[in-house]
Image: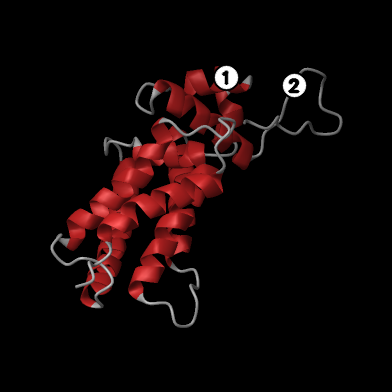
Amino acid sequence: MIRPPDRKPGARQGRTTYDRDSLVEVAVAVFNERGYDGTGMEELARRLGISKSSIYHHVSGKEELLDLAVNRALDALFAVLDEPCGAHADATARLEHTVRRSVETLAAELPYVTLLLRVHGNSDAEQRALERRREFDHRVAELVRRAAAEGGLRGDIEPGLTSRLLFGTVNSLIEWYRPDGGLTVEAMADALTSMVFDGLRARQS
């Protein structure tokens, strides 16, 4: 939900003012609706109800708005990788924690993650976002490799493929998950982790 912008004391009635965060919030909604390539500064100004020059007071243009938006999603996802997961947690437990917390992060930052997953690499900002996504994927794949080496995950599936399948499942949530749909984030995370890890755990002989 887009929060209303702040109104500065003494501002004329009917005129709204934005800070950078609220500008980004509205821009994300418009980018998700129309596509980043299909959104111009004129459309953003119209949707915000302010002039283009007012937008440029806060950011250099729509590419900076995209940078700010996708980095919010990426920073949240990378923070999951660095969270403590118990002093004696093995790689399998850490991987399961990462998947569960990534589901929770996706739900908490749904518009921002949705935008991140829809970038195509047609601009410098999109290329930077894709590079950080690849770094995240590599770190997850390394965690999968460690979990397989420890015997926690089956070793007959290539770790990079496991990583892509795992996060392909997590990322698919943007297509159907809605916060007001009656499904709690906890229930969704429980169902997803149970489903994928029941198939990934090493079979006991």
Q: Where 128 falls versus 83 (above or below)?
A: above
Q: Is residue 5 left or right of residue 138?
A: right
> Within 10 angstroms of label 1, few (less than 14), some, or many (20 or more) residues?
few
Question: Does label 1 or label 2 sit earlier along the sequence?
Answer: 2
The quarter of the rendered structure image containing the N terminus is top right
User: For residue 60, which numbered disc appears in the image?
Assistant: none
Q: Where 102 falls versus 26 (above or below)?
A: below
Which residue is more in the foreground, 195 or 54? 195
Q: Amino acid at mark 1?
A: Arg
User: Quarter of the image holding residue 81?
Assistant: bottom left
The image shows residue 29 at horizontal and vertical percentages of 51, 28
Check the image and name the residue furthest to the front.
205
Q: CA distance from mark 1 to mark 2?
A: 13 Å
- Contact? badges 1 and 2 (CB < 8 Å): no
The image shows residue 95 at horizontal and vertical percentages of 36, 65
Q: Amino acid at mark 2?
A: Arg
Residue at left offset 20%, top offset 65%: 154
Q: Where 51 falls versus 72 (above or below)?
A: above
Which residue is more in the foreground, 120 or 58? 120
Residue at left offset 31%, top offset 62%: 140
Secondary structure, mark 2, is loop
Which residue is more in the foreground, 134 or 19? 134
Q: Where 132 falls versus 183 (above or below)?
A: below
User: For residue 47, which numbered disc appears in the image?
Assistant: 1
The image shows residue 46 at horizontal and vertical percentages of 56, 17
Q: Which residue is mark 2?
A: 15
